Amino acid sequence: MIDRRQFVSGSLAMLSASRLAGQDVQWPSPVLDVHLHPRHGDDREIDHLRGAGITRAVLLPSLGSQERARDLAIKSPAQFSWFGNADVRLPDAIQGLRGQLTSGAIGMGELKYPLDIDGPEMRRVYDLAAEIRVPVLMHYQEGAFNSGIARLPALLKAYPKTTFIGHANSWWAHISAEVDDKVGYPSAPSKRAA
């Protein structure tokens, strides 16, 4: 088994060699990118998939690009699916997310708001995710976005029917038994819990 750093460096070497040879990347099996933000401009997402050797991607729109994500998934359903997004701090956010989910979104995210992970705004999102049975992808960055990751175990117990997908600084830092929330992405090896 290889670790994350070995995977990334090997992948970059393969991408570089393929691009230098003027070829699209060819992986030995299908690759799903679960974190592609819609780009502005015609077919840039398709070009990204081809250039990186990705078979299919889940589009994670920012506020304002939800319609583009939906339209790409409708236009190219073999290549794209999409998640819904809304400013969860607003009172009508759940209504907006519900509308996106009934219009074809297969999850919610990347949710990246300056809130506590167990605050009332986020709890409404978790309730909707459990009700409709879709995942919610969170950007955990202590002190900035979705703070309070140390309380995540209690949240998982409180929402057993909600599927959480973790991402970002605090998420990756907390795969180690020794965590420094003041550091961005950790550079030291992960430590096993005792």
Image (spheres, rainbow, N blue to C red):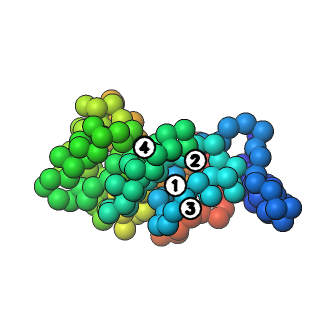
Viewed as shown, does residue 144 lie left or right of 26? left
Q: Which residue is drawn at 28% across and 32% down?
A: 132
Measuring from the top left, give residue 78's x and y in whole percent. 54, 38
* Tag in front: 4 or 1: 4
Residue that numbered label 1 is attached to: 36
- Give whichever of 156, 106 is nearer the camera: 106
Residue 164 found in image quarter:
top left
Q: Which amino acid does label 3 sit on?
A: Arg
Q: Which mark is residue 44?
A: 3
Vertical arrangement, residue 42 with respect to residue 149, above or below: below
- Give whichever of 84, 24 is nearer the camera: 24
| SS at mark 2 in the image | strand
| SS at mark 4 in the image | helix
Residue that numbered label 4 is attached to: 74
Q: Which residue is drawn at 65% across and 47% down?
A: 54
Q: Which residue is drawn at 51% across and 52% down?
A: 35
Residue that numbered label 2 is attached to: 33
Measuring from the top left, give residue 115's x and y in whole percent. 28, 61
Report if the CB atoms under discs 2 and 4 are less than 8 Å apart.
no
Mark 3 vs 4, N-terminal side: 3
Mark 4 vs 1, N-terminal side: 1
User: From this viewpoint, which residue is outermost toward the left?
Assistant: 91
Q: What residue type is labelled 2?
A: Asp
Viewed as shown, does residue 23 lie left or right of 36? right
Quarter of the image where the N terminus is located: top right
Vertical arrangement, residue 26 with respect to residue 90, above or below: above
Q: Which amino acid does label 1 sit on?
A: Leu
Mark 2 vs 4, N-terminal side: 2
**Mark-to-mark CA distance, 3 and 4:** 16 Å
Report if the CB atoms under discs 3 and 2 are less than 8 Å apart.
no
Q: Which residue is drawn at 34% across and 55% down?
A: 67
